[in-house]
Image: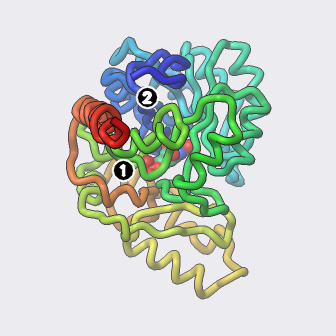
Amino acid sequence: MKTRITELFGIEHPIIQGGMHYVGFAELAAAVSNAGGLGIITGLTQKTPADLVNEIARCKDMTDRPFGVNITFLPALAQPDYPGIVKAVIQGGVTIVETAGRNPEPVLPYLKDAGIKVIHKCTSVRHATKAQAIGCDAVSVDGFECGGHPGEDDVPNMILLPRAADELEIPFVSSGGMADGRSLAASLALGADGMNMGTRFIATREAPVHDNVKQAIVAATELDTRLVMRPLRNTERVLKNTAVERLLEKEKTLGADLTFDDIRDEVAGVYPKIMIDGEMEAGAWSCGMVAGLIHDIPTCRELIDRIMAEAEAIISRRLADFVG
Ligand SMILES: Cc1cc2nc3c(=O)[nH]c(=O)nc-3n(C[C@H](O)[C@H](O)[C@H](O)COP(=O)(O)O)c2cc1C
């Protein structure tokens, strides 16, 4: 299958693994890229730019195919060393960057000068057209269903993707709620040139996270996610657990008086405990509604091959039969 996204990134299949904190290590990025998709290392999970250079080198040892690095611009109080991260990406010879969070304009000239292709992940049409205007090569359009930060507009992909298609000239991928060949065929029908997946890629054999995390995703249904931090305008879709119930109780009790300090225990520094140690009640962790569509833990190659076969069958048989 050839699309503007496979052409832009030099990949075999139009499937991207979005950056994920404490999940997007070299092992997963390499496995996705080796299977013909685009794997992405999460820049901010690496403690220093030197660690990121190392992680990029490890990924290069595991794959000859293109892979990317995610740079997430946080609303956080403590700002990471973004210039250092950009330097590490350039020094590592990475050719693709996924930006997310705030506007990537300040770092764009450095990335473009180094010949790096930039895909910006955003949750609204206005941010997507802004990304196009400042020179991003593509966008990843994250609907309300998505695991992680869906923004504050709450527009699901059935509306958001065709709206993006109406406004954008650069190619875009769907993101949020994507799991299988039906998702890919639907994304293409709605105007996207590929799809990005987060939660689905955590429940794979190569994802370097504790087995408890994978089992929690397989056990979860589409009813098991919650939105937290909405009062702080930093909404995150997470899997429900006791920490999340406690967090939501605090949001309800404190109302407009809620500050980040009130929920620090439930959200700060919890990812290593969950992803590495498998402590599933340690805090709030991002997970999409798509958990309801995830029932197994395949290898990345099995997953991607299955998605491509299913999408091609839907397009060339099921859909073609309706008009044939
Ligand atoms: C555990 C987890 C951690 C994530 N961390 C990040 C991150 O650090 N930066 C980022 O841009 N997106 C992050 N995301 C969002 C994903 O890259 C992707 O956009 C999202 O998962 C798509 O929705 P889906 O889970 O329904 O596939 C994360 C998602 C999950 C599930």
The answer, for residue 208, to whether it is visible in the render is no
Q: Nearer the viewer, residue 89 or 282?
A: 89
Q: Quadrant of residue 103?
A: top right
Q: Residues within 10 Å of mark 1 (few under 14, many from 20)?
A: many
Residue 142 coordinates in the image, percent (x, y): 56, 48
Which residue is at 47% across, 55% downward? 147
Amino acid type, mark 1: Met
State yes or no: Cβ of the residue under disc 1 lies below 8 Å from any atom of ligand 1. yes
Q: CA distance from mark 1 to mark 2?
A: 27 Å
In what element is the residue under mark 1? helix
On residue 275, the disc is 1
Amino acid type, mark 2: Pro
Which residue is at 66% across, 29% downward? 170
Q: On the rendered image, what quadrant is the C terminus found in?
A: top left
Q: Which residue is mark 2?
A: 14
Q: Is residue 134 left or right of residue 199?
A: right
Relative to 2, does residue 288 appear above or below in the rendering? below
